[in-house]
């Protein structure tokens, strides 16, 4: 069973944005749906990190007085996958993502990876072309815990006074696992995207007394489902969160599937209370972070105009189409937590009174509403709209939809905020 399936190159391409000038309006702003004009490749590095167990930071080698050192840690890389949003026709299961590697001509290919040797993968990925119209959310890497010796255990040693006690931790609780990295964790340089997959040793072992574990007759500490079982179970819980990915999925020894977030990484990305989670909600950066999407006979153009010294998004709907979602002003990548309370606020007016729809959902096509969906009566004088709601599900990539179609009109929007209040 494979978890991953290709990175369709929707990789870290900024929207083509024209910023607001000092003039009254900035006509012809392009919002969203970027098309990559150049090929972008992928590389990846795999390493052991002895820095303090921070969610995002520079890797560090083992110090001379390090209490626990990993000597050998190898896995089989099975797949690389991307997860993107699209606003053009794509025959792809967005939830499963797209397979980047292995290539179609060799679908059974695997790649041995040594974390302890500091593996850097470039040649194996040299034919990856990330050119697409998508917007990257995550890159996933999937590994198999093989039966081959050296690929099913972590080997290391514990420093206790003047002694070094070897240990072997068996990865017998996991068959397969997938690590999913947030787009903000991925570095872009020149025409290459690099994914860094680091295993954080301090996150793995800190607070556990490995030195007190039972030592075998051969002087080795064996940590598995029959020896030092309590310690083995604790390390099982820590193993996948010790990678600094956003989240993970895995299949256990019994064939049951699980998924979860890496708590410290997610906490850093999920947004603080009383902070506006809508980037560029005041349109000071023009149309950056916003997407104009038209479909089903809808048509519109946009500009950012000055209104009493404030930047305002102007959407001129030239063809309303048959549905409110025939014309959409969208904002992706809003991190929300299930059960948390949020307040959505914005100011809107139009030259023709009528209804628009505001909702929070996901980037997956036809995704269900997450917290609120409201029909807002828009008048010809500016009015502030406010809605308090609780998120139904945790989502690092929730999407705010302002559905403006069905009628020909010009709509003005400003001061868009979505704030976690408790």
Image (spheres, grey):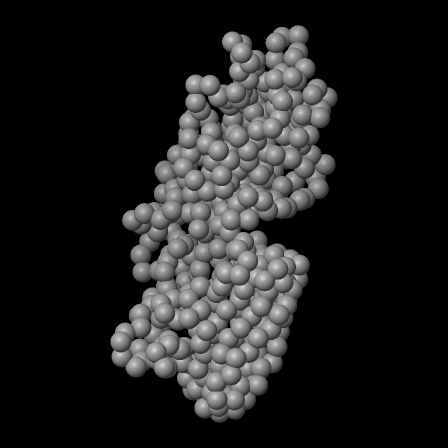
- Who's the residue at 65% across and 12% down the image? 215
- Return the x and y of residue 410 as percentages of the image width and height: 43, 86
Q: In this view, does 182 lie above or below 201?
A: below
Q: Quadrant of residue 264?
A: top right
Q: In terms of image quadrants, where is residue 254? A: top right
Locate residue 302, reporting x and y percent. Answer: 38, 78
Which residue is more in the foreground, 292 or 306?
A: 306
Is 137 in front, or is 280? 280
Residue at 65%, 64% (x, y): give it: 390
Counting every numbered tag in the picture gives 0
Residue 92 on image: x %, y %:
53, 59
Which residue lies at the image location 31% right of the left edge and 80% below the top edge? 25
Front residue of 99 and 12: 12
Residue 206 falls left or right of residue 192 = right
The answer to whether residue 124 of the structure is visible from this angle is no
Q: Is residue 369 left or right of residue 200?
A: right
In the rendered image, residue 148, in percent from the top left (x then y), is placed at 58, 25
The residue furthest left is 22
**In the image, what residue occupies the spot 49% across and 79% down?**
347
* Residue nearer the viewer, 137 or 414: 414
Q: In this view, does 122 lie above or below 117?
A: below
Image quarter hosting the C terminus: bottom right
407 relative to 40, above or below: below
Q: Can residue 379 be seen in this view?
A: yes
The N terminus sits in image quarter: top right
């Amino acid at each position: 069973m494979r978890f991953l399936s290709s990175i369709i190159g929707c990789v870290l391409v900024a929207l083509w944005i024209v910023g607001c000038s000092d003039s009254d309006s900035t006509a012809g702003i392009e919002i969203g749906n970027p098309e990559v004009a150049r090929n972008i490749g992928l590389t990846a590095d795999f390493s052991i990190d002895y820095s303090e167990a921070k969610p995002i930071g520079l890797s560090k080698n083992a110090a001379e007085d390090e209490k626990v050192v990993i000597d050998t840690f190898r896995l089989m890389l099975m797949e690389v996958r991307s997860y993107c949003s699209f606003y053009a026709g794509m025959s792809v299961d967005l939830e499963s993502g797209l397979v980047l590697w292995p290539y179609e001509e060799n679908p059974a290919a695997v790649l041995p990876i040594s974390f302890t040797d500091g593996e850097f993968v470039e040649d194996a990925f040299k034919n990856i072309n990330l050119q697409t119209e998508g917007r990257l959310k995550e890159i996933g890497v999937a590994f198999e815990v093989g039966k081959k010796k050296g690929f099913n255990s972590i080997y290391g040693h514990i420093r206790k006074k003047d002694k070094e006690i070897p240990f072997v931790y068996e990865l017998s609780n996991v068959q397969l696992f997938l690590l999913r990295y947030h787009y903000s964790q991925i570095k872009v340089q020149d025409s290459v995207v690099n994914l860094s997959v680091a295993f954080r040793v301090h996150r793995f072992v800190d607070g556990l007394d490995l030195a007190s574990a039972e030592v075998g007759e051969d002087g080795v500490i064996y940590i598995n489902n029959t020896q030092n079982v309590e310690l083995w179970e604790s390390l099982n819980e820590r193993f996948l969160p010790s990678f600094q990915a956003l989240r993970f999925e895995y299949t256990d020894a019994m064939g049951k599937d699980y998924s979860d977030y890496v708590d410290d990484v997610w906490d850093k990305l999920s947004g603080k209370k009383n902070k506006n989670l809508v980037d560029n909600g005041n349109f000071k950066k023009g149309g950056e972070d916003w997407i104009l999407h038209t479909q089903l006979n809808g048509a519109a153009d946009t500009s950012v105009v000055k209104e009493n010294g404030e930047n305002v998004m102007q959407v001129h709907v030239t063809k309303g189409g048959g549905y409110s979602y025939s014309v959409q002003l969208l904002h992706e990548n809003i991190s929300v937590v299930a059960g948390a309370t949020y307040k959505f606020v914005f100011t809107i007016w139009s030259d023709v009174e009528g209804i628009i729809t505001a909702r929070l959902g996901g980037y997956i096509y036809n995704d269900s509403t997450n917290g609120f969906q409201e029909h807002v009566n828009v008048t010809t004088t500016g009015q502030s709209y406010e809605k308090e709601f609780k998120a139904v599900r945790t989502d690092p990539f929730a999407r705010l939809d302002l559905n403006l179609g069905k009628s020909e009109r010009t709509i003005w929007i400003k001061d868009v905020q979505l704030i976690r209040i408790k």
